[in-house]
């Protein structure tokens, strides 16, 4: 993976450099260096991005299967993890991005729906 791919994938996950660094247990400066081609991008980074992308796509699929009902999502990590314990460690932001993806897919298919806060 090169620096531009790292930036694109990070941004597609809704993460800033600090957010990715936190998930990797790195200093923010290390992510900045990777994106500035000042540091090699390790397999660990690709693995974490793949994990988050898989989570996003899995969640979006589950949410799309629940249509035409409302698309429920979570405002906090704790609420998300309580409802989806298998996703512990994945930020709730990823669920919200998946919810937006599901909403967009529904609208393209002519299904009217909305994103709402999950009741837990």
Image: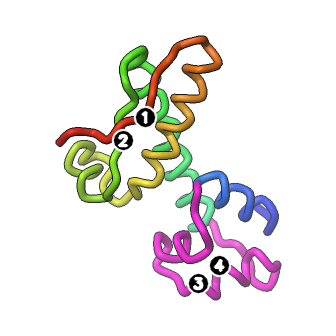
Magenta range is: 14-43
Which mark sits nearer the N-terminus, 3 or 1? 3
Residue bearing mark 2: 73
The reply to whether callout 4 and callout 1 are in contact (CB within 8 Å) is no
Displayed quadrant of residue 27: bottom right
Of the 4 image quadrants, the one containing the C terminus is top left
* Residue 111 locus on image (x, y percent): 53, 13
Which mark sits nearer the N-terminus, 4 or 2? 4
Q: Residues within 10 Å of mark 4 (few under 14, many from 20)?
A: many
Q: In 3D space, how far apart are the residues under numbered discs 3 and 4 (Cα atoms)? A: 5 Å
* Residue 84 locus on image (x, y percent): 27, 43
Q: In 3D space, how far apart are the residues under numbered discs 1 and 2 (Cα atoms)? A: 7 Å
Q: In 3D space, how far apart are the residues under numbered discs 4 and 1 (Cα atoms)? A: 32 Å
Looking at the rendered structure, the secondary structure element under dot 3 is helix
Which mark sits nearer the N-terminus, 2 or 3? 3
Taking depth in this image into account, of 47 and 91 the one nearest to the observer is 91
Residue bearing mark 1: 115
The reply to whether callout 3 and callout 4 are in contact (CB within 8 Å) is yes
Residue bearing mark 4: 31
Q: In 3D space, how far apart are the residues under numbered discs 4 and 2 (Cα atoms)? A: 28 Å
Q: In 3D space, how far apart are the residues under numbered discs 2 and 3 (Cα atoms)? A: 28 Å
Q: Is residue 62 above or below residue 24?
A: above
* Residue 58 locus on image (x, y percent): 46, 35
Residue lying at the far top in this picture: please name it.
110
Looking at the rendered structure, the secondary structure element under dot 1 is strand
Residue lying at the far left in this picture: please name it.
120
């Amino acid at each position: 993976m090169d620096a531009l791919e790292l930036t694109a994938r990070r941004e597609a996950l809704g993460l800033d450099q600090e957010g990715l660094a936190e998930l990797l247990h790195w200093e923010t400066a290390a992510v900045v260096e990777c994106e500035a081609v000042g540091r090699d991008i390790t397999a660990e980074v690709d693995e974490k991005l793949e994990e988050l992308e898989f989570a996003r796509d899995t969640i979006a699929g589950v949410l799309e299967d629940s249509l035409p009902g409302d698309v429920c999502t979570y405002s906090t990590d704790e609420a998300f993890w309580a409802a989806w314990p298998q996703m512990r460690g994945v930020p709730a932001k990823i669920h919200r991005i998946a919810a937006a993806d599901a909403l967009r897919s529904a609208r393209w298919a002519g299904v009217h729906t909305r994103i709402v806060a999950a009741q837990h």
